Image (cartoon, rainbow, N blue to C red):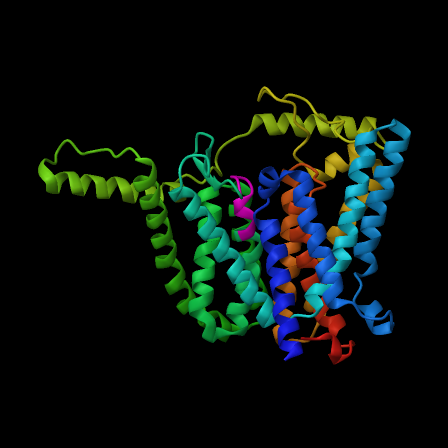
Amino acid sequence: MYMVHRGFLISLLLMFSLLLAALGSLRDVVTPLGYWGLWGAWAVAVTGMTWKPISASWMRLLPPVWVWGSYAALVMGILLSAMINRSAISLHHGIKIAVIGVCCCIAWRLVADLEWRVRVLILRWAVATVVLVFLLSKAAPYGYYIVMGKAGREGSFLAWPGVIWKVGAFFLPLFLADMLVHRRSWMANGLAFAACVFLVVIDGSRTGLLVLGMAILAFLVLLIWRREWSVLSGIKSTVAVCVPALLVLLLFSAGVGYLAHGRSVVHSSKTTGTVGIFVSETEALVGTAIDPVTKTRLGDGDPELVKLLLNGIDLALDCLPLGCGFGSTSIDPGYGVSMSVHNAYVGALADFGLLGLAGMLGFVVAAIIPIWRVLRTPQVASEDMYFVVAAAGSALAYLASLMLHTFSSEMSEWGYLILMLACAWLPGRMSRVSASFRV
């Protein structure tokens, strides 16, 4: 009874951390200090639930050298840059990254106590919760539902456009793995796929769409390389659920928006009477539903971001080897506001020097190693293999997305990385750990 109760509480703590990352705009509601306070409460609760006397088994559940070494290099680079440039804000961000490193160790212990089946189930509930929050926000009065830009990027007050796509894009690879391992879960995974794609589509994120495409392509390449044709044939049922479910979600979202906010409806001049108006409104509603799919923004240019990148590269070279302090790349590219370079690696090099860049690249290596190990194994499939590739691929996708986003020291961003890295590394390490550590 105690083990069941403990396992349930640990599952809730993982769910809590996933939602804190997925609903990152909560920081603007409860204030940044309140948001960090929630992560602090989570850290205390996880530590209390998973605490074990220090031993060889306990030490094996700490992050590998590629992870904690990367945090160490990044923090050292930030602190050196802060000292050289006398930058208090750099010191502030260095402390935050150090705290995130501690949270990474705590997340490692949390994930170690859960099996893959439970992890995937919690991921499904997290995605479903984000979708529900979005739909409820859209049905609520103005102020809870957020629309941005000419393309009409959608989000909620807890997950703004630019935030809401991440849970869909970064969690989808785990559902892909579960689809291959547990083929009888085709209904649940099909619905989870639809929810993930829905969140990316309504956001209109180009990065999210690229991540989705690359995740699916990478899994197809892996299966073809391992010649697992039987697995490929089992995908049909999941796709058969995903496509109509996605259309239903889009239609339902458009309907909620129309009923709650009086969306404008274009009436056809060729139709008259009650039936004609109904047909026109239905056509307009369907058009509104599929509009996010047709407007992907992939073809849109962005000269302002190119200007930021070129400026960031110039400053990075000028600021070698220790960097010029946090925010050194900030300029107004033409938006009317000052912005930093939208490339976390260039930003780290410019702000924190070579050590800062080395720390960021260390995380990339930490995400690649689990995939490399799987590719080196004999042509024998296992449950862990697919999930390891999925989790490591998700972490790698997050790190690749940083090439299009600014450097951040917020847990709403780093939460995805530390949880996915923990999932990618722990299966192989858990085989050497006593069963008493498992739920």
Q: Which residues are magenta?
A: 159-167
In the rendered image, is residue 357 in sight?
yes
User: Which corner quadrant of the image does residue 120 belong to?
Assistant: bottom right
Seen from the viewer's position, the closer of residues 380 and 423 is 423
Residue 222 in picture, x, y percent from top left = 59, 65
Identify the residue at image location x=69%, y=56%. Answer: 42
Q: Quadrant of the N terminus?
A: bottom right
Identify the image quadrant of residue 279. Answer: top left
Residue 371 visible? The answer is no
In the rendered image, the vertical position of residue 29 relative to residue 434, given as above or below? above
Left or right, residue 133 beside residue 170: left
Relative to 132, 387 lies left or right: right
Above or below, comparing residue 237 to residue 246 in the picture: below
Find residue 84 and report its horizontal and vertical position in percent: 90, 30
Membership of 165 in magenta stretch? yes
Residue at 38% in and 64% down: 241
Which one is nearer the viewer's eye here, 29 or 297? 29
- Residue visible at 66% across and 77% down? 3
